[in-house]
Image (tube, coloured by chain):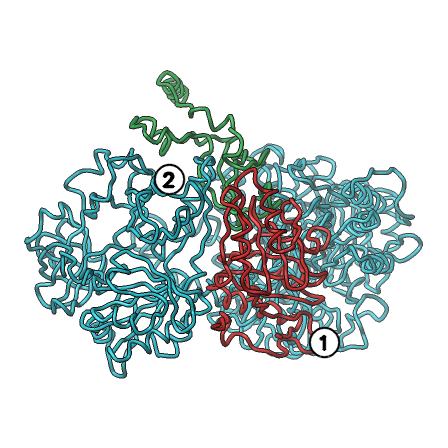
Amino acid sequence: MVERESPLGQAYKPGRHGNVAEAAGVTLSETRPGSIVEVIAWPGNEKTALAAIKSATGLALPDRPGAGVSREGRAGYGFAPRRWLVIDDREGAARELHKAVAETTGVINDLSHGRAVIRIAGPRAEWVLSKLFAVDFSTGAFPVSNGCSTSHHEIFAQIQRTGKNQFDVVVFRSFARAFWTTLCHSAEEVGYEVS
Amino acid sequence: MRITCPYCGTRDVVEFTYQGDATVTRPDPASTDQAAWNAYVYDRANPAGKHSELWQHSGGCRAHLVVERDTVSHVITSVAFAGIKPNPARTTTPKRKSPARKAATRGKAAS
Amino acid sequence: MSGRRISDRGRIDRSRSISFRFDGKSYSGYVGDTLASALLANGVALFGRSFKYHRPRGVLTAGIDEPNALVTVIRNGKREANVPATQLEIHDGLVTESQNRFPSLAFDVGAVNQLAGSIFSAGFYYKTFMGPVVGPLRGTRFWMFCEWFIRRAAGLGRADHAADTSRYQRMNAYCDVLVVGSGPAGLAAARAAADAGKNVILAELDPVPGGSAKWSGETIDGKPAAEWASGEAEALSDHDNVRLLTRTHVWGYYDGNTLAALERVGDHVASAAAGAPRHRHWVIRAGTVVLATGAFERPIVFPGNDRPGVMLASAAQRYAAEFGVLPGKRIALFTNNDSAYVAAAELSAAGAEIAAIVDTRQVISAGARDLAAKAGGELLLGQAISATNGGKALAGITVQRLDPVTGTASGAKQTIPVDCLAMSGGWSPAIHLASQAGAAPKWNEDLQAFLPPEPAQPWLGAGAFAGDTTTADTLRSGRNAGMKAAGGRASRAQAAKLDAPQLDPFPAPVFEIRSAEGKSGKALVDHQLDVTAEDVRLAHREGFLSVEHLKRYTTLGMATDQGKTSNVPGLAIMANARGISIPEAGTTRFRPPFAPVSLGSLAAERFGDVSPDRLTPMHDWHVERGAEMMPAGLWHRPRIYSLPGETLEQAYVREAKTVREGVGMVDVSTLGKIAVKGPDAAEFLDRVYTNKFSTLAVGKARYGLMLREDGLVLDDGTTWRLGENDFLMTTTTAAAGKVMQHLECLLDVHWPDLKVALTSVSDQWAGAAVSGPDARKVLERAVKGTAVDNETLPFMGIVYGEVDGAQVMICRLSFSGELAYEVYCGAGHGTHVWEALLAAGEPFGILSYGMEALGTLRIEKGHVTGAEIDGRVTARDLYLDWMLSKKKPFVGSAMMDREGLVDEDRIRLVGVISLDGLPLGGGAHIVEGDSRAEPNESIGHMTAFCYSPVLAKYIGLALVKGGKARHGQRAFIADPLRKRYGPVEIVSHHFFDPEGSRIHG
């Protein structure tokens, strides 16, 4: 098996950065999951598609805009009408979902190489993300496991809250380094750790 | 301006792309009626006040939305997914000024 | 420190002394001081010179409304001009300079402008410099001659040319209730909303919350108001649901209850913490806004009202009470209302001698009389100040009887020596944000002020902003606004216990004092731009009657203070000149920003990095191999991989030759790729492409052309059928986003019945195009799991295999005109596969090539790209009409045959060969005659050019009138910008291998 290269290159610099006067406000990392798969249902087939996702991955995604599930090593959420994103630490989820989703139900797209997942965790995660995205990240408006689609200027992003103080940001691979650099820059104020 | 996307919720207008007038109807693809195609591609009413517009949530869920908006006050009265339900506004042909009305407008301007 | 400092007043920290510089001299102040308060404490009265006349100026206000005391701050060698001294907090190491003076503030040669005052009156620029040249001293040419001198002599601070190294950030915020202003009203509103459980943001432009409570001297709930305010602020900061933003001015009120605010994070500290911004640009989306922005005191317009030492009564009171500085030792007050009496009493209590209180009114309230008695000094009713004297600082005032009907001061003169005059012309609610958000403001005759308009967005007003005149009313309306904003109901109950004198809340309608003697000195309306009352009357005489014309003709209300102190007096003087009421004369409509905003804060994190870099999977490989990278939209692509000493042309010619003679490889990962899937995918493609795709076999690709609805070409590219209902569409790099939106719109809006799903997969795949006669040999060595011979992989065929353990998908198609293959793999394997292909190609001398060689190869073949598909061409213009299916309608088919689009004389695609052996130029015009001397009519333009290694000539593509009909003709290129003229031959755009035999090789 050929190892996948990270899109971050030299921009990925492990260690403490920015304001080091206090404890790191956030920790930044690239999660590098094995599978990133998009599931699309034809109109009226939403429930069938969700059942297929559950049978293939075990993720019981609620049928509400932006609703999702976040578990250790596996997560999913709705990010657009009739569309869900499934992220799995293991490779091969695309194959399983392709089998599970019938042609009459919808289609899937394997985006495992095409997207990068950047995790921001820590007490200042909401503060740092709020510099870049015009989305209300407070827990009331953005509960754990929910996801959304938004953008930072040209950079399209799908964001899931995977913990009280943790968000996974999915960006196009070609923009990953630019986004990572911007995110690091924005996190300097609170001090950050790259792990 | 902020638009309430039926899927994503209320977002800043920068996440959306204006995609044209939602009141025009695409003619039958096989139609060769040049007047109908011309009306669909070019004729626009440009009203000051209530207007029905297409906006794509291009920086979000990418859905196309029919937005009922006042072009003077920017007040948005409704947002719905495009193409889901037949929208009465979209099935009516655009009103074209009759020659008589045009003349009346000119007369008013001259007086 | 001078005797101006009081020992027992103010919120300054006397235990922490600060050293700072002003005009090269070192001064000291305390933590909590502004530059204005610290300089006043040091006995400095002269802060700068005025805009046009270079008149000496001091401080007029103590806040954000300051028009006069603007200074330049020098920080890390970088100059920031026009900072109000009243807003600038001092810190150790602060270096400041006064502005608009030469050679020094005390001795300024520009002050001679005062003598020539009447020349520089309203409309000076228009009258002197606009229009045709009629004499030696008129017209635009004269302006060009005078500009340097005038620019030096007039104006505010000078901008710096050095790059701004400060950091700025943007912050997106959401709240239930935004309270603007933290005076008594704002504090009460925030408290009420916070207690109701709402998420509250409280924005305060000063460093310390409290507003007027910090200096009013009132007693609230049995405590000094300042103490009450700090207690309330502390209580608020204990709430989890409250964010208190100090040093933050809300400057814009936009649609959707979106407000913009600027937080000055780092201006008050000597050096910023790592990563901390200097300014933070807040964009706040609020459920409800409570506007508690208070009111600005107005100056009175009278001769000599701009002499240093003349200031607003509230400012004088504030300097004493909030900063512990007496603005003068012997102070007179001049007023048309009761509020100045409070100031007089406070200043007196602080230790100043009150020389006199001059009131334009004959009769005043009992409360005011009591305060006057407390303050001491003469009480001069029905009188006015008609002149001031002194040089660069106030030495005395002249008082005369006021005729209340004409506003003229006349009769016996009484001269009173004073070093400070505190004036009050009434109060104007700070309605700026409400005005931005809604309709025109409403004039209130009692208050002689504009009150906020009816809300067009969800906001509530409170306090002096809404016209409240006592702190008791203010606290009640603040609390009620907070409760209503939280969804509750207002209450009539008293909000707090107040201990304040009973005063008349309404001012006399007096805005200007005119001296009976005529010329007695300039009476300034707009201190910042040197607009006098006479200028306003001149504008009236010359017909500039409307408030908008008045502003533009006289510049009244422009520049950094936006007329906070001058708008209403200016309007009143114009109304008086016209003999109409103030609301009839017009109302001021405010636009953002309320106060100056740093441009850096708007650029925020995009500073120095305007757009994100989009990188292909093999980006680092290219850079490490010395590729010269070039932008292609947001993408970075290799331009050439040059050898030492090679020119650009030598490099790309070598690379292109390698492809024609052996084999080369180029990174094509940037091509737009869209997954088109679903049972109706083939039908959908038939509708959007001009040619058919439903007939395409699985495992094959086809070149496709897309039109817009209007019949012009949108884009081209190949689409691969990977499965019965599974297509991979490729687009040109530049048009990927545009094509995606076009297709999404058709599906969403017009054909929602089609079961087709579109997803951008551009980034999923890394692509390498292997081209050249030896391409197949490279693949034979590199690819496992599939054959690549002509039978297994014919032209436009697709196979799947493995390259060094990584899965690949290979399509045989050619942009270069050679035998060529596009090898796609998962983007994360891009570099791995790229290197494996290069290793396999080593025996054949494989080279990577860049965009220049790619362009050269395609020009030789006559393939079109975005340079030709420029949104103005038809398929026929490009000789692609063979791709227009007659068997089906498609997007654009109905409109593509319109008369103007099928005209034979349109500019159409041709090839061009340079006849003088010199390079051609993109964008050059094609003309029929040699146009070096006299331009000929353009018959078209060049779209691309290169040196062609196979033809050994400079060639190019062009769009030329008539197209094919001109083949074999001679023409000329004309490129006046680059001074390139020369003869060319117009030929077919298929320069090389027109039969395409090499592709099938």
**Above or below, A144 relative to C274:** above
In the picture as drawn, the residue positioned furthest to the right comes out as C222
**Element assignment for label 1:** loop
The chain letter under disc 2 is C
Q: Are marks 2 and 1 on the same chain?
A: no
Place of residue B40 in the rendered image (x, y in percent of width and height, measured from the top left): 37, 31
3D distance between C-alphas at marks 2 and 1: 61 Å
- Report if the CB atoms under discs 2 and 1 are less than 8 Å apart: no
Place of residue C511 in the rendered image (x, y in percent of width and height, measured from the top left): 66, 44
Q: Nearer the viewer, residue B5 or C271?
A: B5
Q: Nearer the viewer, residue C417 or C169?
A: C169
Residue for badge 2 = C683
**Element assignment for label 2:** helix
Does the rendering let one see residue C86? no
Q: Which chain is red?
A: A
In the picture as drawn, the residue positioned furthest to the bottom comes out as C644
Q: Nearer the viewer, residue C811 or C466?
A: C811
Does the rendering let one see residue A15? yes
Quadrant of the snapshot with the C terminus of chain B: top left
Rendered residue at 76%/50% (across/down): C358
Q: Residues within 10 Å of mark 2 (few under 14, many from 20)?
A: some
Please tell me the colour of chain B: green
Mark 2 is on which residue type?
Answer: Glu
Q: Nearer the viewer, residue C734 or C929?
A: C734
Q: Which chain is cyan?
A: C
Residue for badge 1 = A22
Quadrant of the snapshot with the N terminus of chain B: top right
Rendered residue at 13%/62% (across/down): C981
